[in-house]
């Protein structure tokens, strides 16, 4: 009888262990927007761009913190973690990813320093040559970036470019080829994208064959597409400022009679903001999918993400190993620190 009871207890313990293992949660970002906390200030913080190295997310965004009258770029970073046993996501704004992570992200700070002026700097768009633009497995462009942004330093908003690309690469066995020498160039305008009106928020498509951006050159803000000639990715930084006869067209399936702004593309998905009719009030966030020939009809993200206030400048990252993908956006909804704050949320892939 004792043997039977002992065996029953053992089976119960094993069943309990199996149950615990079965309850292991898949990493998932919260499907309800989460304020980025200490990264925000009492002033406006919006228009972000993210760079991911390991488990550290570096955010570059526009801010009026410190009582500024204009927007300047600043950078903050945070760690993220997911407890697969408890099913909880956590983050903090004091990341430590090791010396290599610190080194690789250091040039992003330099990019913001050289881009800032006494005017407004908006819509930063930063591509890592090593992680985003290309990676061939043999050579590395460690700590090298291409940065596009908009500034009204000459009156209206124009799109500018700066970079720290080096033609000499390093092997995969080394982390840095004199990182301190990888300084950024002085920002230059990209004439083929600019007009006498406001132009901003550039983003490449997934093949780097077109740049999408927003402009009010025809009155209200619409989404435009600049079709690029066959330019090698290693020459984007040198060719974009000198391109002429680039075909620029309004993207009818994405634009409306209202203001459509802040496009951002990750893979086959575009997100943007619009105050078109049918939303929840102010600017709402929308998404559209590329089917290989055109963009689908934009879809509102719904009341879980959008509010009666303004939701602005959404950005995506689907490279993180979570079951959904990360979207970061800004909003002036109640409950923040003041003005616009940055928020994160998980959306379906």
Image (tube, rainbow, N blue to C red):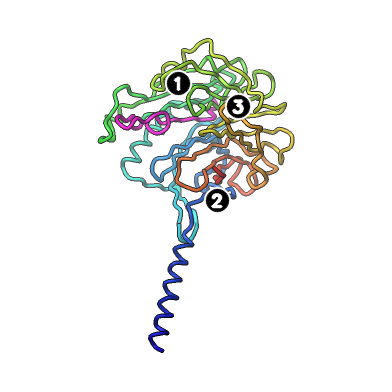
The reply to whether discs 3 and 1 touch (Cβ–Cβ < 8 Å) is no
Residue 216 drawn above or below residue 35: above
Give the numbered dot on residue 30. 2
Q: Position of residue 235 (x, y in %)?
A: 40, 19
Of residue 107 and residue 70, the one placed in the foreground of this image is: 107
**Image mark for residue 294:** 3
Q: Residue furthest bottom?
A: 1
The reply to whether discs 2 and 3 touch (Cβ–Cβ < 8 Å) is no
Residue drawn where x is 58% and y is 48% of the image: 33
Quadrant for the N terminus in the image: bottom left
Label 3, label 1: how far apart the Cα atoms are: 33 Å
Q: CA distance from mark 1 to mark 2?
A: 37 Å
* Range of magenta residues: 119-143
Residue 154 percent location from the top left of the image? 55, 18
Q: Looking at the picture, how far across and down is residue 309, in whole percent?
A: 68, 41
Residue 187, numbered circle: 1
Q: In this rendered view, identify the residue nearer to me: 261 or 35.
A: 261
Residue 344's label in the rendered image is: none
For marks 2 and 3, the one nearer the N-term is: 2
């Amino acid at each position: 009888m004792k043997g039977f009871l002992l065996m029953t207890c053992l089976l119960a313990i094993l069943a309990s262990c199996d149950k615990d293992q079965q309850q292991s949660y898949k990493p998932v970002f919260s499907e309800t927007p989460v304020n980025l906390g200490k990264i925000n200030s009492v002033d406006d913080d919006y228009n972000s761009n993210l760079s991911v190295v390991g488990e550290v997310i570096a955010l570059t965004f526009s801010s009026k913190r410190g009582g500024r009258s204009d927007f300047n770029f600043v950078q903050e970073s945070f760690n993220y973690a997911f407890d697969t046993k408890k099913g909880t996501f956590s983050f903090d704004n004091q990341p430590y990813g090791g010396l290599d992570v610190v080194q690789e992200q250091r040039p992003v700070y330099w990019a913001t320093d050289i881009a800032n002026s006494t005017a407004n700097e908006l819509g930063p768009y930063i591509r890592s040559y090593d992680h985003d633009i290309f990676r061939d497995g043999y050579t590395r462009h460690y700590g090298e970036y291409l940065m596009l942004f908009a500034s009204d330093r000459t009156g209206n908003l124009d799109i500018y470019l700066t970079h720290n690309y080096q033609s000499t690469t390093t092997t995969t066995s080394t982390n840095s080829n004199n990182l301190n020498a990888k300084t950024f160039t002085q920002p230059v305008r990209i004439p083929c994208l600019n007009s006498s009106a406001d132009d901003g928020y550039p983003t490449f498509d997934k093949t780097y064959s077109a740049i999408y951006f927003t402009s009010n050159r025809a009155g209200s803000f619409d989404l435009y597409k600049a079709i690029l000639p066959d330019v090698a990715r290693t020459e984007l930084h040198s060719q974009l400022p000198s391109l002429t006869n680039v075909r620029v067209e309004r993207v009818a399936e994405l634009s409306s009679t209202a203001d459509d702004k802040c496009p951002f593309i990750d893979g086959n998905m575009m997100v943007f903001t619009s105050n078109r009719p049918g939303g929840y009030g102010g600017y709402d966030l929308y998404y559209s999918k590329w089917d290989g020939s055109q963009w689908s009809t934009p879809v509102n993200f719904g009341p879980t993400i959008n509010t009666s206030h303004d939701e602005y400048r959404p950005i995506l990252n689907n490279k993180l190993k979570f079951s959904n993908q990360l979207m970061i956006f800004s909003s002036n909804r109640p409950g923040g620190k003041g003005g616009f704050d940055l928020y994160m949320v998980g959306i379906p892939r």
